[in-house]
Amino acid sequence: MTTEATADARPIPTADWVTIADLYANPYPIYQRMRADAPVHWVPAVGRYMVVGYHACHEIEQDQERFSADETGSLMKRSMGHSMLRKDDPEHEVERKSYGGVLRPRAIKQHWTEVFQRNARTYLDRLKDAGSGADLIAEFAAPYAAENLRLIMGFRDATQEDMQRWSQTMIDGTGNYADDPDVWAKALTSSQEVDEAIDQLLPYYRDNPDGSLLSQLADMPISLEAVRANMKMTIGGGLNEPRDALGTMVWALLSNPDQLQQVLQDGRWADAFEESVRWVAPIGMYPREATRDTVLDGVMVPKGARLGVVIGAANRDPAVFEDPETYNINRPKQPHLAFGGGNHFCAGTWVARASVMQVAAPMLFDELPNLRLDPYNSAKDAGWVFRGMLSLPVHWG
Ligand code: HEM
């Protein structure tokens, strides 16, 4: 593929018909229209070049020389500090390696799976004690994901509610394009609370090591500023996504009883999980910046272009996925981009898979007999930068 600017590359079309409100409500018809025209569009409402084609997104992920993660004017840096997610190698690699094996399969098998099972039991018992109906997001998926992350990260004096508040307010800062001072104030308060917690915990873990992330980082030759930023990014990136993956998976299976039957009969939780995050990518878009004039999948991208890598659209590209708008656990295997790719490939992939597909989803269907959608209160999904279920009212028994 040609990577430098050439005369025959297409100019980028402008999608001035796209609005943030429409994207938030349901981005998929918008992505269909954009993809049919070109893999990249300038979108004035978003202030970015939105990359909606699978091959173009994949090309960006694999090439940090042309597409840097260190974006100019990044709101994420302002909200959470300069984390590894907004750095290129070699700086990024040093910080990524500082996480050691804490989030990797061996630690998950030896240590974390048991923790996930205990947490799932706690919130499942609360559901059962409270009756025969609930909002599965607020009453199970959110506290479960938050408590798992709290323990993995080692925030021993915080609560799962703190984790949810920290995560949401700092994510709101990352998306504060309107520059709302109230949003910044809340993000700053959370950021300071996290800094204080880290400052107290690092000396503690030097004397009392355990398997948590903060314990792993306590003796690492990484600056305090970087540790703080990476912890905040991980709070922002490790809570809502498993929550949303679980919510989407349960909703999709309850809406497709024939597929649910196959999953229950043959234990196809992995197929159901991968198809869920393909169908609705919990992180729908993330940023990159072009370091030079370049050609991306046949279109001209200028140096300095602020790009939105729309993996939510790439995962439904009909050039790669047959009948992409449909949830189908039986589709031919094809790698999705929900966990990103290249050097920033999600560090928490194995945590997400273990906590959602191995533990929480099977337990929910096993222990809540005749689990079904509430016919009177419909489930609500929304979002495009992050997308998931806002509420999922269900009944059982
Ligand atoms: C279904 C759940 C999840 C999804 C869909 C997801 C998705 C992603 C994506 C797309 C990226 C790359 C973003 C970019 O390149 O700008 C990423 C990075 C990251 N994720 Fe996840 N994530 C999930 C769960 C988690 C969990 C549970 C954790 C932590 C326990 C986590 C920790 C991270 C970290 C630390 C990075 C930064 C990696 C780096 O910069 O090298 N994620 N995630």
Image (tube, grey):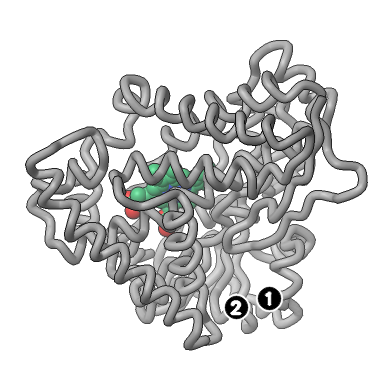
Vertical side of 190 occupied by 176: above or below: below
Q: Amino acid at mark 2?
A: Val
Measured from the top left, where is residue 211 in percent x and y?
Answer: 23, 33
Whether residue 339 can be seen here: no
Quadrant into which the C terminus falls: top right
Rounded to the nearest angstrom, the CA distance separating label 1 from label 2 is 7 Å
Of discs 1 and 2, which sits in the foreground?
Answer: 1
The residue lying at 69 percent from left, 42 percent from top is: 136
Q: Is residue 274 above or below residue 385?
A: above
Residue visible at 20% across and 62% down in the picture: 226
Find residue 322 and report its image quarter.
top right
Residue 194 position, x and y percent, is 30, 62
Q: Disc 1 vs disc 2: Cβ atoms closer than 8 Å?
A: yes
Q: Residue at x 57, y 54 (%)?
A: 311
Amino acid type indicated by mark 1 = Ile
Q: Is residue 289 above or below residue 26?
A: below
Label at residue 20: 1
Q: What SS does tag 1 mark? A: helix
> Along the line of sight, which residue is nearer the eye, 396 or 234?
396
Q: Nearer the viewer, residue 72 or 200?
A: 200
Disc number for residue 46: 2
Most distant residue in the right direction: 376
